[in-house]
Image (cartoon, coloured by chain):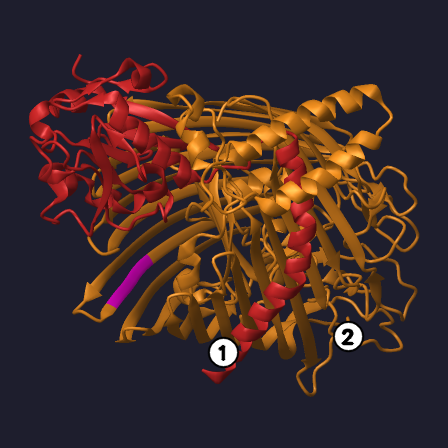
Amino acid sequence: MGLLKGVRAFAAAWASRPWRVLRRSLALLLGLSLLLGASAPVSEYQLKAVFLFNFAHFVEWPTAALPGENAAFVIGVVGKDPFGSSLDEVVRGESVGGRPLAIERYPDADAPRLGRCQILFIPATELTHLTQILDALKGRSVLTVTEGPAPRGAIVDLLKEDSRIRLRIDLQAARASNLTISSKLLRPAEIVDAGS
Amino acid sequence: MAPAEGLGSDAVERGVREPDARAWQFFAIAVATGILNVLSTPAPAQTSDDASTGELKRLSVDELMNVEVTSVSKEPQKLLRAPASIQVITAEDIRRSGATTLPEALRLADNLQVAQINAHDWAISARGFNADLANKLLVLIDGRAIYTPLYGGVLWNVQDYLLEDIDRIEVISGPGGTLWGANAVNGVINIVTKAARDTQGLYAFAAAGNQLEEQGGARFGTQLAPDIYFRTYGKYTDEGPDVTSTGASAHDSWHIGRGGFRLDRDAGADQFTVQGDGYSGHEAMPGTGDSDLSGVNVLGRWTHSGPDNTWMSLQAYFDHAYITQPYPAVPSSIFESGFPASLLTDSLDTYDLDFQDHFHLGSGQKIAWGLGYRATREANYNASELRFSPPVLDQALYSGFLQDEIELTSSLYLTAGSKLEHNDYTGFEVEPSVRLQWNVDPSELLWAAVSRAVRTPSRYDHDLYAPSGLSGAPPPLQYPTLIVRNNTNFVSETLIAYEVGYRAELSSHLTGSLATFYNDYHDLRSVTATPTTAFYPLPYPVFFQNNLEGDTYGFELSVSYQLLDWWRLRAGYNLLRESLHLRPGTTDATGGTNDTADPQQQVALHSSMDLPYNVSWDAALRWTDSFEIDDGPTGGPVVGIVPSYFGLDMRLAWRVSSKLELALVGQNLLHEYQVEYGFPSPTREAIVRSVFAKITWGF
């Protein structure tokens, strides 16, 4: 253990000192990029979090599926949460239809509150349990979101293609959940509609 | 944001001093935008290298779909749990490197030694023994072994793929015989292509430059039924000649075309794959004649996945590879009978069947076992100067393995197992290993292993012979009739490897890995000469024996540092010390130099940047130590030097739209031409600086 600690301490020191100098000179580059009006790159889950935020606005839930007045509109994440703090940052202080937005995290498909959210994000790591999750939500108006390419079943699939995120929307699954999706989402998305 | 702002105003001042009016105007606009940018960032909690969430939230859905996410990614987390010296080359790494062929992509693995010999040939090895016809690596593409039993190595000129459709390349340095079998002595390279569903739609590219004269490729993927996906691809490469040491053309240009398909059916727990490829190429060969290369393969696999990472698979494949190599006529003279012009051909058919089952036994054990059968038919229609005995060889290989991973405590795992296989040259071979894995904490892993691995004889070691063509010796002198003779007593080379490694995620930005090894080799290939006498003046024929032994030790260090969200740095350093010697009482005609050609040290630095305006810039700098190389098994105890050198590759790419990318790639930028390999001679080749442009459509 002593050896390990020593190696780690050495690496930490080595990592911090020369790099701090380098980082400072790097700030110049960063400054230049800001100056040129280009925004700094976006991380994948920051962008996915903003997509989820948009879904809350561009999807219509049946009134019965929405929580009571002033109760929170819930975006749920099942399994290991890949967002870090991004999702919390995106919804902080935001509301939809007068309801504050809130995040809930569920350990697995058996979580009792799973069906209580309005949007459920199913990370890639949970894809093996997709059928189980979808079964648990059967008959409920929950907008299920996977990160693909995922097997069929969920309503929205966020596809990372090269370095952009694309939407794939399953209209049949949306209808089965009594959800109406705005054309603002449908137009740029790839539509799958096995029912028509 | 504060430091950026401060430095920003420095830059403004410099902008003002700029005399050019247009530049001034440009800067004024830029400053205005910059200030707006800074002002419009409301969240003070944001770190300075993240984009503002507020800004993103104001974008429409259409605009969001055009936002590019940073793609300079860290190594996969899973790697932290691998108790071996493994490096993974991701699809992203390959794309960003500007590599045009598989061997070029392997330069990305810091735990490999990669040297280009000429326009179409490569020497690639791990932990040394990168001799001409290196033979201690096992290489697989989607589970299909691609090393040739002709010499135990890989003909890198014919092994390639549409690089865009490769999912990852796992490079393991160190023995892997317990799972993979014979030939996984110093390392295993596992090339995994993407599933057909991940390669949907049209993708096409074209590239042209000075050395890469033209290259083009295309893939089309489509969904045939709700759970059936298909893709087909083609690729064509035409490379110009490299040069000899005088800078004159070496006349070794070549071209190769290939195509293939993959069909996946994803029926829940059961997955079915059928895939196949074919290629045909032609290479100019100075000194002999042009060589033709072709091959086809088809593979089928069924995988059944159960809960908790248990799975079972059955795989079968057929592979046919064909090479022809012309030998020009040698005229007869006073002491030579001469040779007629002839064509050496190597035709190899492989039929392989493999079953594996991975399951849990009780709560703390995971068992893996498998059975394998491989039949090969290798036909060498002999050239007059180079022959194999017998010319047609049918061989069968039976193998089985059993491995148990035991959870000793929640953080300590012991894996023990062995492969047992039977081959027609040497009979039974056993390749056991014991591996200990200690997950010190979630971000730290310490591992140690002891393994035995074997390299079974190849056709080259066992069956090769070459007539001398000498005749008419004045009596009582006698000339040898053979230069090289076959040796049916050649046995397997063996290795006992001792490894200790450490891998850690030292911070969320910094990961590192250190693997140390001590390898103890026995029965390595040596070259025995025929004793000379007063009446038998030439030391031929030579033949291969197993008289060499010795040890090697060293370490592989690699560090990956995510400096900023858009800038990743990677560094690797290898040290390799070799000490080989003859078994007491034996001799070697090359002085024990025929199996090694290895730099003692190797350094690599990779930088990957995502710049504004969808521009990415990648650079790889490598330094290879000088090394000694001999003149082949018939060349005697003479070594030459390949000098140390720096190499620099760069790629600058601009993503014009979501579908279109333009890239400019430079390889070997530091030298007009550079020797990477080969015994010094007027025909030793140097690799020419290569610059090419590439246009890519669709993703």
Viewer-closest of B110 and B551: B110
Residue A94 lies in quadrant: top left
Q: Residue furthest bottom?
A: B584
Q: Colour of chain B?
A: orange
- Determine the CA span between mark 2 and mark 1: 46 Å
- Judged by depth in the image, the label closer to the viewer, 2 or 1, is 1
Q: Which mark is residue B572?
A: none
Q: Residue at x 63, y 47 (%)?
A: B3
Magenta-drawn stretch contains B663: no
Residue B593 in picture, x, y percent from top left: 75, 70
The region drawn magenta spans: B366-371
Left or right of A6 on screen, residue B6: right
Residue sitting at x 36%, y 62%: B399
Image-based side of A2 in relation to B99, left or right: left
Q: Is residue B627 left or right of residue A62?
A: right
Task: Indicate the quadrant containing the N terminus of chain B: top left, top right, bottom left or bottom right.
Answer: top right
Q: Determine whether the residue tagged by mark 1 lies in a helix, strand or loop.
A: helix
Q: Which chain is red?
A: A
Q: Nearer the viewer, residue B8 or B356?
A: B8
Instruction: Measuring from the top left, give residue B8's x and y in whole percent.
Output: 68, 39
> In the image, what residue type sits under mark 2?
Gly
Q: Is residue B343 visible?
A: no
Question: In this figure, which residue is indicated by the disc labeled 1?
Answer: A5
- Examine the rendered structure and indicate whether residue B473 appears above or below residue B411: above
Letter of the chain that mark 2 sits on in the rendering: B
